């Protein structure tokens, strides 16, 4: 934030807040992990070229309308 305070939308701030809450309730251990994001591209872009996505679908789209839908739906990559 402009005031140098963490944003409430910052996932690190959320993790730190939950860790503090666990400690207040007597929990000694807190486990977490990162969620890896990815993009599906049509081709490998040449250096300096803008990558071109394979579709405009998103991971949580409710209706399949893109060629990457089956890939994202599998979830075991």
Image (cartoon, rainbow, N blue to C red):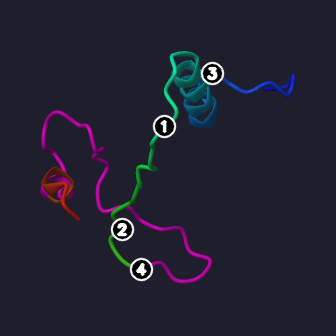
Q: Label 3's element?
A: loop
- Residue 15 position, x and y percent, is 56, 32
Marks 2 and 1 sit apart, C-alpha to C-alpha, by: 36 Å
Marks 3 and 2 sit apart, C-alpha to C-alpha, by: 32 Å
Marks 2 and 4 sit apart, C-alpha to C-alpha, by: 7 Å
Tag 4 and tag 3, C-beta contact below 8 Å: no
Which residue is label 2 attached to? 41
- Residue 76 position, x and y percent, is 18, 60
Q: Nearer the viewer, residue 60 or 36?
A: 36
Marks 3 and 1 sit apart, C-alpha to C-alpha, by: 20 Å
- Marks 2 and 1, the one that precedes in the sequence: 1
Residue depth check, mark 3 versus mark 1: number of the one nearer the observer:
1
- In the drawing, does residue 15 fall left or right of residue 75? right
Q: Nearer the viewer, residue 54 or 35?
A: 35
Q: Main secondary structure of the magenta part?
A: loop
Give the answer, above or below, for where 34 lies relative to 11.
below
Answer few, some or many: residues within 10 Å of disc 4's Cα (few below 14, many 20 plus, some between 14 and 19): few
45 is within the stretch colored magenta: yes
Q: Residue at x 44, y 49 (%)?
A: 33
Tag 2 and tag 4, C-beta contact below 8 Å: yes
Instruction: Say which quadrant the N terminus sits in.
Output: top right
- Residue 57 position, x and y percent, is 27, 46
Instruction: Say which quadrant the C terminus sits in.
Output: bottom left
Marks 1 and 4 sit apart, C-alpha to C-alpha, by: 39 Å
Instruction: Looking at this view, name the residue that lies furthest to the right.
Output: 3
**Which residues, given as a range, are shown in magenta?**
44-70
Which residue is label 1 attached to? 30
- In the drawing, does residue 30 fall left or right of residue 41? right
Which residue is label 3 attached to? 8
- Marks 1 and 4, the one that precedes in the sequence: 1
Answer few, some or many: residues within 10 Å of disc 2's Cα (few below 14, many 20 plus, some between 14 and 19): few
Which residue is label 4 attached to? 44
């Amino acid at each position: 934030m402009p005031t140098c305070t963490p944003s409430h939308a910052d996932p690190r701030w959320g993790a730190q807040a939950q860790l503090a809450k666990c400690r207040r309730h007597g929990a000694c251990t807190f486990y977490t992990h990162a969620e890896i994001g990815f993009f599906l591209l049509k081709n490998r872009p040449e250096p300096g070229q803008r990558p071109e996505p394979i579709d405009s679908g998103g991971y949580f789209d409710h209706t399949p309308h893109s060629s990457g839908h089956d890939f994202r739906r599998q979830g075991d990559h």
